[in-house]
Amino acid sequence: MPGIDECLHEAMALPGARGASLVDWTSGLALGTAGDSPVGNHETTAAETAELARAAAEYESFAAATEGEELPKGPPVEDVIVTTRSGYHVIRFVETSFDSSVFLHLWLDRSVGNLALARIRLGDLAERLVLG
């Protein structure tokens, strides 16, 4: 089971990966980073992506179950994908034994990145990630 550095190294091995980070969305702090940042500063990117993750995780519109249906255990949102003209940003929530307030953020070059593969691999990494 990979730790933070190994997890980010695996994420950076994905086709088109430009940067990766593990972020605490309650504080907006990067717990680990690899590669480049879209704005040249990993801490700024962590704070900005944390705002988006927090909104997705906390707004009822994204987490609501249909009437009579119960939500499965774990974070209410699996991932958030933002598509820009030059890239993809994939935010994958990580379920933890404590408060589950962390996510993986992967920045992909749109011309060579594979969004479907990135989603699958980040999901796998999020399940295997060991925080401690």
Image (cartoon, rainbow, N blue to C red):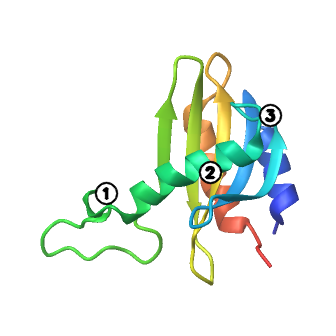
Q: Position of residue 84 (x, y in %)?
A: 51, 24
Q: Secondary structure at mark 2?
A: helix
In the image, what residue occupies the spot 31% across and 73% down?
71
Q: Which residue is mark 1?
A: 62
**For discs 1 and 3, the disc positioned in front in the rendered view:** 3
Q: Secondary structure at mark 3?
A: loop
Q: Nearer the viewer, residue 39 or 128?
A: 39
Q: Which residue is mark 3?
A: 36
Q: Position of residue 125 (x, y in %)?
A: 70, 57
| Residue count near mark 2 (Cα–Cα under 10 Å), binned few <14, some 14–19, many ≥20 | some
Seen in the image, is 22 located left or right of residue 13?
left
Q: Nearer the viewer, residue 68 or 19?
A: 19
Image quadrant where one finds the N terminus = bottom right
Amino acid identity at mark 2:
Ala
Q: Position of residue 32 (x, y in %)?
A: 80, 56
Q: Position of residue 124 (x, y in %)?
A: 65, 57
Amino acid identity at mark 1:
Phe
In the image, what residue occupies the spot 69% across and 31% down?
38
Seen in the image, is 83 located left or right of residue 106?
left
Q: Secondary structure at mark 1?
A: helix
| Residue count near mark 3 (Cα–Cα under 10 Å), binned few <14, some 14–19, many ≥20 | some
Q: Relative to 29, say whether 81 is above or below.
A: above
| Residue count near mark 1 (Cα–Cα under 10 Å), binned few <14, some 14–19, many ≥20 | few
- Distance from disc 1 to disc 3, alpha carbons, whole Å, reads 30 Å
- Distance from disc 1 to disc 2, alpha carbons, whole Å, reads 21 Å
**For discs 2 and 3, the disc positioned in front in the rendered view:** 2
Image quadrant where one finds the C terminus = bottom right
- Distance from disc 2 to disc 3, alpha carbons, whole Å, reads 15 Å
User: Can residue 47 be seen from the camera position used here?
Assistant: yes
Q: Nearer the N terminus, badge 1 or badge 3?
A: 3
Q: Which residue is mark 2?
A: 47
Q: Relative to 117, say whether 93 is above or below.
A: below
